[in-house]
Amino acid sequence: MFLCYVDESGDTGIGAGASTHFILTAMVVHELRWLATLDTILGHRRVLRQRYGFKVREELHAQVLLFHPGDAARIAKSLRLRMLGEVLSFVGALTDVAVINVVVDKAGKPAGFDVFDAAWSALLQRFHMGVSRRSFAGPSNPDERGLLIADRTDEKKLRLLARRLRRYNPVPSRFGTTPRHMPMQLLVEDPVHRDSQHAYFIQLADVVSYFLKQAIAPNGYVKKKGARHWFNRVDPVLYKLASSTDPHGIVWL
């Protein structure tokens, strides 16, 4: 079974006061590689503790760490940014994970456009595709399944969406013909929800998502420090089959 840990960045609103983009970043790992990968992550967290004084059980939340650090303010801001860069390099060097990214660019979207539904549908479709094709990193067994594990989100809406797609999932044809019916029956159970504070995989997804946003629309600090393109550090683990039109496999909506 493949486990898919997902983090959201931005909001699902449209119009004044809403974020310009809504991003989903998913980290996929096979259950047979889960413990070894977790141990590798914990080993890296101990390195960060030794190098920066960042505690193993402190949450890696990029936006908060840079601009609302709380107790982590004991670490200089420039070092916190450097640490996040090291986290990206660490993720890019992992051998048994795949990272899926979905970006909704809200520019020009009508007021009634359902950002949440569009983004999560695209993410679930790519996850299901990877499971069905056995094209993720890690073991490739003949009868795989997938389980979604999400950070705090609209739990009810995501649950209903996943249930609907399991039974009814019309996929538009590239040739303009009748959509194909491709229910997502390889995804088991309702999505499981975890608080990112207690989920190291979701924390890594958060850092990747943050720097994807910076590659799209960097803030002043990231631009000043030359960190705008640090997202490229995770290129080796990006699931590029997710999109044939983007060199990083990013799904743009």
Image (cartoon, rainbow, N blue to C red):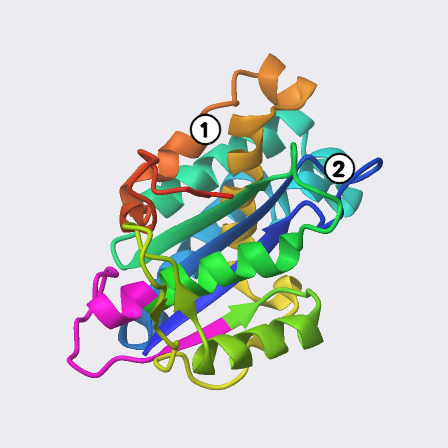
Q: Secondary structure at mark 1?
A: helix
- Name the residue located 46 percent from the left edge and 42 percent from the top edge: 87
* Nearest to viewer (mark 2 / mark 1): 1
Residue 172: which quarter of the image?
Answer: bottom left
Assign the magenta stretch its main secondary structure: loop
- Name the residue located 75 percent from the left edge and 37 percent from the top edge: 73
- Name the residue located 31 percent from the left edge and 65 percent from the top edge: 129
Mark sitting on residue 184: none
Q: CA distance from mark 2 to mark 1?
A: 22 Å
Please, is residue 77 above or below residue 114 in the view?
above
Please, is residue 233 above or below residue 189 in the view?
above
Counting from the top left corner in percent of width and height, residue 171 is at 38, 63
Please, is residue 159 above or below residue 137 in the view?
below
Counting from the top left corner in percent of width and height, residue 16 is at 84, 35
User: Magenta segment range?
Assistant: 129-148
Please state which of residues 238 and 90 is positioned toward the viewer in this rendering.
238
Dot 2, crowdedness within 10 Å: few (<14), some or many (≥20)?
A: few
Label 2: which residue?
Answer: 73
Q: Residue furthest front?
A: 177
Counting from the top left corner in percent of width and height, residue 180 is at 33, 68
Residue 109: which quarter of the image?
Answer: top right
Counting from the top left corner in percent of width and height, residue 117 is at 60, 61
Q: Is residue 186 magenta?
A: no
Q: Indicate the amino acid at tag 2.
A: Ala
Please give the count of numbered marks on the rendered protein: 2
Res 152 visible: yes
Label 1: which residue?
Answer: 230
Q: Secondary structure at mark 2?
A: helix
- Name the residue located 21 percent from the left edge and 68 percent from the top edge: 134
Q: Residue furthest right?
A: 16
Left or right: 169 in relation to 151: left
Q: Is residue 146 magenta?
A: yes
